[in-house]
Image (spheres, rainbow, N blue to C red):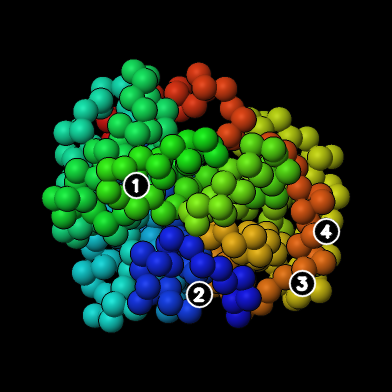
Amino acid sequence: MNSYATDTLFQRHFPSTFKESPPLMALGTLQWGTTPIDNNIINGSRGVLSESEARDIYSTFRSKGVVLFDTAEGYGGGTSEKRLGRLRQKEPASDDNNEAIFMSKFLPSPWRYTHAHFESALRASNERMGISKAPIYFLHSPMHLFLRSVEFWVEAAASCKRKGLLDALGLSNCSADEVRRAVAAGEKFGIPVIVNQVHFSLLDFNSPALQEMQQCCDELGVSIIAYNSLGQGLLTDNMDEVKFSHNKPAKMMRIQWRDLKALREVLRQIADKHNASMAQVALNWCRSHNVIPLVGCRSKKQASDTLAALDWDLFSHERELLDSLALTRCTLDSPVWRRKLFVILAGVIMSAC
């Protein structure tokens, strides 16, 4: 089922793939890296995802019609991109309507400050994924220590488009103002800016900054891809008060267990009514707002449960009730210094990988 369809630049840019409906879901591969850092730090005690596990997850999503796969040069120092490339090579040929769309990202770390840095990173990502042209390439953050603007990177992307290296530009972690500026720059330099990937979940929906960003994207036809749509497990069945006490994202967002009580109770009630999991409810809540949920999976079983969300829809009164209980912990409200620090730390980890 898919009763949440809406016309967006995303659909218009890929008319054969999304002619009848917008993208249903996207699979994230943050934890698909294969380096020692991934094994010991990024994935903690769970270790590196095996090649067979990754293949099973990928195949399960493809069999359900999912075509969007999200990665980045910094995920495992490019090893996540390579893994996607290997899976694509082993996949049976498909028509253009069902061809996988790989989406990678450029991280504007302090030591990367020219158009040449952008192009070099894009070429390297394309090579690792085994493609000659990126369907969508993201700017991982609008923040740069040396004040390179969003417009500067949009111009770099437009130059790469003219060289046949990418089709469209995506944004990540951009506010309403940054989205407006990027879209205007895209029109000026000649490249479509079609999507903004942000933290979007029931943990931050009632933030004024998120609401403004969503309204801006709706007005401009820019799609939203929601990462952390399950709130790092805070919105799932497996979370309890004991596990919550060790949940780092909750500490970072300054969320108390009591803040989640009413929201989780309603998630559970709706899940029971639909014979579904709380995770499926949270994902369908995103879809009900015409937002594409980006999910990460560690097993075929988890992938199957996640994809079962596509078999049913929320009723409007259920969505409205969840809206009223949503929190306001939005990453777009983070101070500039913290957002820049993220880029620096992510760049250091990427280099270490």
**Alpha carbon distance from label 3 to label 2:** 19 Å
Amino acid found under the numbered disc labelled 3: Phe
Along the polypeptide, which appears first: circle 3 or circle 2? 2
Image marks 3 and 1: residues in contact by CB distance under 8 Å: no
Q: Position of residue 124 (x, y in %)?
A: 18, 45
Disc number lying in front (3 or 1): 1
Quadrant containing the N terminus is bottom right
Q: Position of residue 189 (x, y in %)?
A: 27, 43
| Residue underneath mark 4 | 321
Taking the image as shown, residue 78 lies to the left or right of residue 178, namely left
Residue at 84 percent across and 47 percent down: it is 261
Q: Quadrant of residue 236?
A: bottom right
Amino acid found under the numbered disc labelled 4: Leu
| Viewer-closest of 321 and 278 | 321
Circle 4: element type: helix
**Alpha carbon distance from label 4 to label 2:** 25 Å
| Residue underneath mark 2 | 21
Disc number lying in front (1 or 2): 1
Along the polypeptide, which appears first: circle 3 or circle 1? 1
Disc number lying in front (4 or 2): 2
| Residue underneath mark 3 | 315
| Residue underneath mark 1 | 187
**Alpha carbon distance from label 1 to label 2:** 25 Å
Residue at 61 percent across and 48 percent down: it is 215
Q: Position of residue 91 (x, y in %)?
A: 27, 75
Taking the image as shown, residue 273 lies to the left or right of residue 10, namely right
